[in-house]
Amino acid sequence: MKSKVFFADMRTSFSKNMSKKIRRLMGKCGAASIIKENDMVALKMHFGELGNTAFVRPIFIRDIVENVCQFGGRPFLTDTNTLYRGQRGEAVSHLKIALAHGFNFTTVAAPVIIADGLRGKDTVVVKVDGEILSEVSIASAIMQSDALIGVAHFKGHELPGFGGALKNIGMGCASRPGKLKQHSNISPHVNEKKCVACEKCIQMCPAHAICVKNKKSIIAAEKCIGCAECITICPNAAIEINWNVTSEVFQKKMIEHALGVIKAKKAKSMFLNFLTQISPACDCYGHADRPIVPDIGILASTDPVAVDQAAVDLVNAEQGQMDSALKTNFEKCEDKFRGLYPEVDWEIQLDYAQKLDLGSRNYELIKT
């Protein structure tokens, strides 16, 4: 049976603006049955790195928030802290960026909560029994919410080929240990040139896996539990991630984390993909390059696999922009994501998600 994916293009008129289109999409998706009175509803999104401008506009998020409130829900905007050291590596700085980008209560009419807490330690372990991982680490606020609305800015990404609904929840809802598992098969390492033996990593490590030898920190791989707290606590960025997983393994781990998020909320979730400012890379970058195709519209579905498949198909159906990051495949119906990342097979994430019963690649596109 085909999954239903609802689509609203970017055309507007006096009688139908984008606000009305977003509300109509949510209604078609069955928001009334997903959101119940007093449900705490997590709007999982990306606030954008400082300097990035491609993230979903706050004014669109307010439309989603107000619609949730109409059904009696209590919405909050949320994302998780990053694995890498940066401007969103802990909740204080993360919240400051969210506010700087317009995600404040006055603008969006909902609070912002960083789902894995102050330093990325608030996590829930979920059993998944995947091909690679038997359990995954998910941010606690995501797991504690009653319903989930994934709000993804659809774009290219160098690891899975593209980032949409599945990446938004698979990587985006993972706590820091979950992110480390997805990106690396071994423990972090110490860059001796940067290490000054301040011992802050030793004080933070819950597994007692770090010691100082010859005035440099050393991580005992056999003791490391992969919590990644040492990475963010080091004041000199001396503890680095071993980015050693292949795209195929990364995609499967990402989908196993998505399974951990969705398995308890399958009847309480919906997913919106914004096909606007379709940039070639993640919103984690401090810039947003020229879109690879023109703006297309917004997709909504209760099936994250179908909504991503529909997004890929709509992007690939467009004429590519010649002065963008596309290297090849500019013509209509050519694979734009292979044009960006020719070595990445983006179908792996969709095939594996379908295998794990997260949804179907077979869909019906319904224009609203």
Image (tube, rainbow, N blue to C red):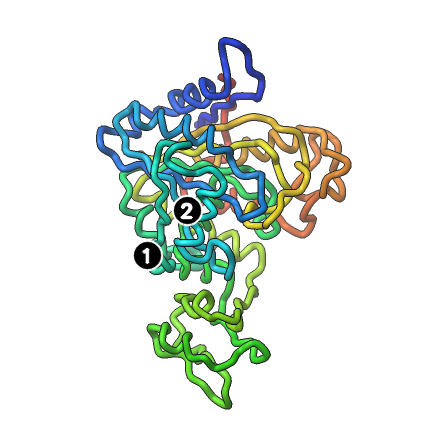
Quarter location, residue 155: top right
Q: Which residue is mark 1?
A: 123
Q: Is residue 186 left or right of residue 302?
A: right
Q: Is residue 289 left or right of residue 252?
A: right
Which quadrant is home to the N terminus?
A: top left
Looking at the image, is mark 1 or mark 2 nearer the viewer? Answer: 2
Name the element at disc 2.
strand
Report the front residue among 137 and 338: 137
Which comes before the other along the chain, label 1 or label 2? 2
Q: In the rendered image, is residue 219 in sight? A: yes
Name the element at disc 1.
strand
From the top left corner, tell me how far across and down residue 112 is, in percent. 37, 42
Q: Residue at x 75, y 32 (%)?
A: 331
- Label annotation for residue 79: 2
Q: Residue at x 41, y 46 (%)?
A: 79
Q: Residue at x 51, y 35 (%)?
A: 56
Kind of residue at badge 1: Thr
- In the picture shown, does residue 252 fall above or below 264? below
Gap in angstroms between the C-alphas marked 1 and 2: 13 Å
Q: In the rendered image, is residue 266 in sight? A: no
- In the picture shown, does residue 136 fall above or below 110? below
Report the front residue among 238 and 8: 238
Kind of residue at badge 2: Asp
- In the picture shown, does residue 9 fall above or below 96? above
Q: Residue at x 42, y 32 (%)?
A: 107
Within 10 Å of disc 2 (Cα), the crowding (few <14, some 14-19, many 20+) is many
